[in-house]
Image: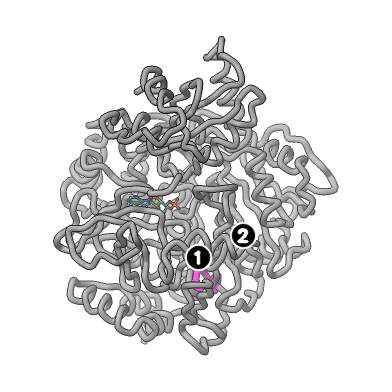
Amino acid sequence: MFVNQNHLFVMSIQIKSLAEYQASYKKSVEDPEGFWAEIADHFTWIKKWDHVLHNDMVTPDIRWFEGAQLNITENCLDRHIADKGDQIALLWEPNEVTDQPRSFTYRQLLEEVCKCANALKALGVQKGDRVCFYMPMIPEVAIGILACARIGATHSVVFAGFSSNALADRIKDAQAKIVMCSDYNRRGPKTIPVKAVVDEALSLGCDSVSHVLVNQTTGGDIAWDADRDVWWHDLVDKQDTTCKPEAMDAEDPLFVLYTSGSTGKPKGVVHTTAGYMVYTCYTFLNVFQYQQGDVYWCTADVGWVTGHSYIIYGPLLAGATTLMFEGVPGYPDIGRFWQVIDKYKVNQFYTAPTALRALMAAGWDEPDKYDFGSIKVLGSVGEPINEEAWRWYDAKIGRGKAPIVDTWWQTENGGIMISSLPGITDTKPCFAAYPQPGVQPVILDQNGAVVHDNNVEGLLCIKYPWPGMIRTTYGDHERCRTTYFAPYKGYYFTGDAAKRDEDGRYRIIGRVDDVINVSGHRIGTAEVEDAINQHPEIVESAVIGFPHDIKGQGIYAFVKSTKEVTDPEGMKKEIFEMVTKHIGPIAKPDVIQFVAQLPKTRSGKIMRRILRKIAENQYDQIGDISTLINPESVEEIKLGAIHL
Ligand code: WTA
């Protein structure tokens, strides 16, 4: 008898009822190792583990499935070939409505990945080497990522909206050997010169890079270094379509992904192989309730963790059909997302509140023109979803019959941590709601004591390891410890504040550190200040987040110049250029206010709390200013404040 292995796999790890969720959750707390071992058992291993978990949340030294060997691409691709070699694994919708979509069956995707893996080997890439990606949303980015995993190279994907300086920083930090890019990138009506940015980054002293593998995406002139640059079509296309998967240890790194924190330069969050695999697949199957044959679409960019875990790894591990979209929500018109859902009969749709707010503002009734009969689950990620957007999403896209999963998690988490399960647990606007099995959230008060009751608010921490968690920050383990594990001993500190309601649902309030969430993108205020301060006429600056209707948070910069600013518009333009050069256009301030002085304490620290209240237009909450050395600065700044 023919047994559909994938069906069995899904059946055995997918939660189907409230009772099952409760039982799984209970077991995951009482016997975490037994719980995860049972789930992990359903994957393909070259060698099974010796120990399920080494638990040290202090140093930290977290190891899951130690002793095991595996290759994640065998689980993403090879294992599906017998059952569903001819099923579509990856669908691709181009930026231009008139261009041809592309699709890859599991068999085709495996072949493409093997070809690319062989090409990387031909370029000298070995297990453990880092490969940097600076690529648009084209199938080749997924192929390249999986090719790295196939041969045990560590991928480091950099969002293709970052500047050459930001790219260079990341290449240098990871000591990448290869950079993969495209010639250009189509984004809505724009064509962006991708390879030129890579060339510029490499001119900033990225000595570790031996080759640049260039995909011809649009055609068009680019500069070429014959010793270094290689065309994808020259090298990859002629490779063999098979490549033996490298046997990786459970804790071998799978990827590095740079993310912003409250201090210093972005850090490389390191995820390892086995735990990440088990966690992303498990959460994908549960949170989206993916069923055989469904078409799933996540609109994230592959340069962020959501793209890694829920466009590529999670769906492919589960044997799903995952849709990748090259374009942007509003091009060629504001109905583009809705048209894509209708065209592909998308069953699960996963996007960010900022996109919903922008589309809602531009065309409240626009979705009415489309058929959304296929939609079963709607997802939200990256920032708090406000109630108005939640209700619109529910009514206009879900037509009142598709549960919304508000998924809270972070780059450091690997996968979704807190979310309702659609059709299984309840949903409530603005609440991410319930922890996934294996996730033990706690709320701490200001002194770091656990608050046990419900109806409380405080700092969100996680008490016990979960398989998808961060292992280290690349090249600097101490930074990982001090950022996440030292603030509250024995806990992973998220940097977010949360509320727990009377029924135990979690609501995320937002960051408590100096990280701003602009359109779902994490931006460290220190990074923006550094960029602004590069301007020769600027003495210092303070960058603060403020509520923004579309972006969630906007960036407010208080800037002190060496002399009186006589041409504020010209100066603002120069500041924009500075920020665009050092980080990228996503970090451009929405508001720049020139100030004569910044409020400071006696020890010379900028009183950010006061600036935050001014930026948020909450003057009545400014509070005590008597500890400042220059209390008069507050009145001056209030007078010149700009509120959009
Ligand atoms: C925020 C994105 C409220 C939060 C996957 C977190 C959210 C940061 C939600 C991580 C949500 C993410 N509700 N806030 N559903 N999801 N956040 O690393 O502040 O890009 O700490 O990971 O986004 O952003 P990151």
Residue that appears at 49% across and 87% down: 51
Q: Please check the rendered image and state whether residue 74 is part of the magenta-colored stretch, yes or no.
A: yes
Pointer 1: what residue?
470
Indicate the position of residue 521 as horizontal and vertical percent values.
45, 44
Q: Is residue 531 left or right of residue 293?
A: right
Q: Please check the rendered image and state whether residue 105 is part of the magenta-colored stretch, yes or no.
A: no
Given residues 472 and 584, the one toward you in this image is: 472
Judge whether residue 45 can be spotted in this image.
yes
Indicate the position of residue 550 as horizontal and vertical percent values.
34, 33
Disc 1 to disc 2, C-alpha distance: 15 Å
Q: Considering the image in quadrants, where does the C terminus appear? A: top left
Pointer 2: what residue?
155
Q: Considering the image in quadrants, where does the N terminus appear? A: bottom left
Q: Eyeballing the image, is 481 above or below 389?
A: below
Residue that appears at 61% across and 59% down: 155
The amino acid on which the numbered mark 1 sits, given as a three-letter code, is Ile
Residues at discs 1 and 2 in contact (Cβ within 8 Å): no
Residue found at the far top of this picture: 566
Regarding mark 1 in the picture, which secondary structure is present there? Answer: loop
Q: Which region of the structure is painted magenta?
A: 72-81
Mark 1 or mark 2, earlier in chain: 2
